Amino acid sequence: MSTELANQKVRNIKVDLDKCNGCRSCEIACSAFHAKPKYSSINPARSRIRVTMDLLNDEYVPIRATDYTKAGCDGRRTYTIRGKEYSECSFCGTVCPTRDLFKEPDSGLPLKCDMCEDEKEPLCVQACPRGVLTCEEIDAVQEEVKLDDMELGMRSLIDKFGSKKVADTYNRMTKKG
Ligand code: SF4
Ligand code: SF4
């Protein structure tokens, strides 16, 4: 993947886990903001932030979707937090083929947090009633060139079906007459 060095500021969202009560307002706001047209629907399955919950232990962890990967990792570690075991996957934001999280439910295409960059403050941060999420600007020593939604989707389709099939389908669909 191509990268560029850039000494610039990028957005980061800090999470204060102790304040989270699992209300899922962040999921609702994110899914509504990214609906097409904007705010036309609410579906947490389309949200780019998901709250991992353990209701019995009253523990909630908001996770934002990060990069797409075409292969699941081999690190299946387990964490014990206050006596309860959690799979490493529960806290991972990577869009990977071994689970359904952060995939657009109809198409299966990856969803990635875009930090709501056109907005003054990310929607999940605005929607959180308990101040769990805080947006800050940090130095980006090495910033990866961001793939836009279309490139991310194309890459996922090519990984799934192969470039020839994707190209053939594109040619068939765009053929006139
Ligand atoms: S920053 Fe924006 S895109 Fe990312 S999780 Fe929050 S609302 Fe969703
Ligand atoms: S909106 Fe805030 S309190 Fe509610 S689940 Fe999301 S991070 Fe937690």
Image: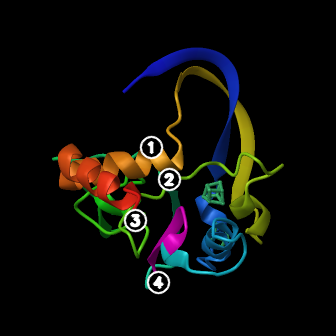
Is residue 77 found inside the magenta-colored segment of the image? no
Q: Given the image, on which type of amino acid does mark 1 rest?
A: Glu
Q: Quadrant of the N terminus?
A: top left
Q: Position of residue 156 (x, y in %)?
A: 32, 51
Q: Are marks 1 and 4 in contact (CB under 8 Å)?
A: no
Does the beta carbon at disc 2 come under 8 Å from ligand 1?
Answer: no
Magenta residue check for 49? yes
Distance CA(mark 3)–CA(mark 1): 15 Å
- The residue positioned 39% from the left and 62% from the top of the image is 177
Gap in angstroms between the C-alphas marked 2 and 3:
9 Å
Estimate the spatial distance between the alpha carbons at disc 2 and disc 1, rounded to whole Å: 12 Å
Residue numbers of the magenta segment: 46-54
Q: Classify mark 1: residues with Cα within 10 Å, few (<14), some (14-19) or many (20+).
A: few
Q: Which numbered marker is on residue 103?
A: 3
Name the element at disc 4.
loop
Q: Secondary structure at mark 2?
A: loop
Return the residue at label 4: 55
Which quarter of the figure has residue 102? bottom left
Residue 61 seen in the figure: no
